[in-house]
């Protein structure tokens, strides 16, 4: 399945059914009076966050959504049936914008969360509702109200515990395939990952992490170079940023790469550098002495970031990395909850 993270759709909720104009006509009950029933309400279009989706691909095949209209009322005060709501499944991390104004209408992040994208029209009242002392036999009823009509833009920002950041061919895809059941494309040339990939890291029955391997970053990505903005959009929703650095070309090159990656994140949004971060120096199996490791550790200390030395190819250092990432993620999660609670009390 292709990865799609932005689509435009049209939504039309159901119209309300018309009220009925009717008069009771039964044997032995002359002039029985008005008995027109109400029309049913139109169905609404409701977005629901599904755990089984991680792309907006289904919206490529279907762009128009229309809910069922309410049925008209009938005689004997029979109300029309309500139109069925149309439930539209969306992946977690879906942001809904009004296509015309650009206004953010909803940010759907929690599994099972629901939001009414277009509200169904109200059913019209039948003539039985308009009886009064001055008007004993009203010969009119209300028409149903039209359902809401909207043009929306959906934008997906992946939600993950760990987001892998690195230059093309740094070994991110290999790392993801090593720690999870995900099978991203792996090759010895750059830009093998052209769309974000998700993998679940299972440490035990009740401990797991969601890791996102996102297309490789290059210089001036914040200006749209390479995968540019398509990549950086998804970084915003990751809890911990893990820089994956290739150390096979030497310590100086590795440090320059880390500086470049942090610079691109800062240029895109200064808030990204406020997230929990760590550095993973990959391909140590090619050769990295203790002096080189100490130099890299000292540099990471100046940035107040933990660093790890691994080989995604051979598996060296992977178990230690997974445990450390879980602890970082749990710490970041607690800080998020504290921040949310403090905002509620303001």
Image: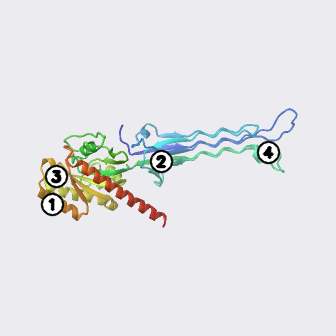
For label 2, the residue is 152
- Give the mark nearest the N terminus, 4 or 3: 4
For label 1, the residue is 295
Q: x and y percent of residue 80 in the render?
A: 68, 39
Is 139 on the left or on the right of 15, as rendered? right
Front: mark 2 or 1 = 1
Q: CA–CA distance between discs 4 and 3?
A: 85 Å
Is the residue marked by circle 1 packed among few (<14), some (14-19), or many (20+) residues within 10 Å?
some
Q: How is the image coloured?
A: rainbow
Q: Nearer the viewer, residue 271 or 334?
A: 334
Is 81 on the left or on the right of 207, as rendered? right
Numbered badge on residue 261: none
- Disc 2, disc 3: CB below 8 Å? no
- Give the mark nearest the N terminus, 2 or 4: 4
Q: Is residue 82 visible?
A: yes
Numbered badge on residue 247: 3
Residue ID at (29%, 51%): 323
Secondary structure, mark 4, is loop
Q: CA–CA distance between discs 2 and 4?
A: 42 Å
Q: x and y percent of residue 38 in the render?
A: 70, 42
Secondary structure, mark 3, is loop
Occupied quadrant, residue 182:
top left
In the figure, 275 relative to 180: above or below?
below
Is the residue marked by circle 3 packed among few (<14), some (14-19), or many (20+) residues within 10 Å?
many
Occupied quadrant, residue 58:
top left
């Amino acid at each position: 399945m292709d990865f799609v993270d932005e689509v435009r759709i049209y939504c039309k909720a159901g119209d309300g059914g018309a009220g009925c104009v009717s008069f009771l006509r039964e044997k032995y009950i002359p002039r029985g009076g008005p008995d027109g029933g109400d029309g049913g309400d139109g169905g609404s279009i409701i977005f629901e966050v599904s755990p089984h989706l991680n792309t907006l691909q289904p919206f490529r095949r279907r762009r128009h959504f229309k809910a069922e209209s309410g049925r008209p009322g009938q005689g004997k005060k029979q109300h029309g049936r309500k139109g069925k709501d149309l439930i539209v499944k969306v992946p977690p991390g879906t942001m809904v914008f009004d296509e015309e104004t650009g206004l953010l209408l909803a940010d759907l992040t929690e599994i099972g969360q629901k939001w009414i994208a277009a509200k169904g029209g109200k059913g019209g009242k039948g003539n039985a509702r308009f009886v009064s002392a001055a008007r004993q036999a009203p010969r009119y009823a209300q028409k149903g109200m039209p359902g809401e009509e909207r043009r929306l833009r959906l934008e997906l920002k992946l939600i993950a515990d760990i987001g892998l950041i690195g230059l093309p061919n740094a070994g991110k895809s290999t790392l993801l395939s090593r720690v999870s059941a995900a099978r991203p494309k792996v090759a010895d040339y750059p830009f093998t990952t052209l769309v974000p990939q998700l993998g679940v890291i299972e440490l035990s029955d009740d401990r797991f992490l969601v890791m996102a391997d996102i297309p490789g970053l290059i210089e001036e990505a914040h200006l749209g170079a390479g995968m540019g903005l398509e990549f950086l959009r998804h970084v915003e929703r990751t809890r911990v940023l893990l820089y994956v650095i290739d150390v096979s070309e030497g310590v100086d090159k590795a440090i320059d790469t880390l500086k470049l990656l942090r610079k691109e994140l800062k240029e895109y949004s200064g808030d990204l550098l406020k997230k929990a971060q760590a550095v993973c120096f990959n391909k140590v199996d090619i050769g990295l002495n203790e002096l080189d490791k100490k130099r890299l550790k000292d540099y990471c200390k100046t940035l107040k970031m933990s660093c790890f030395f691994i080989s995604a190819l051979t598996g060296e250092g992977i178990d230690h990395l997974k445990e450390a990432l879980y602890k970082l993620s749990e710490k970041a999660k607690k800080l998020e909850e504290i921040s949310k609670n403090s905002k509620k009390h303001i």
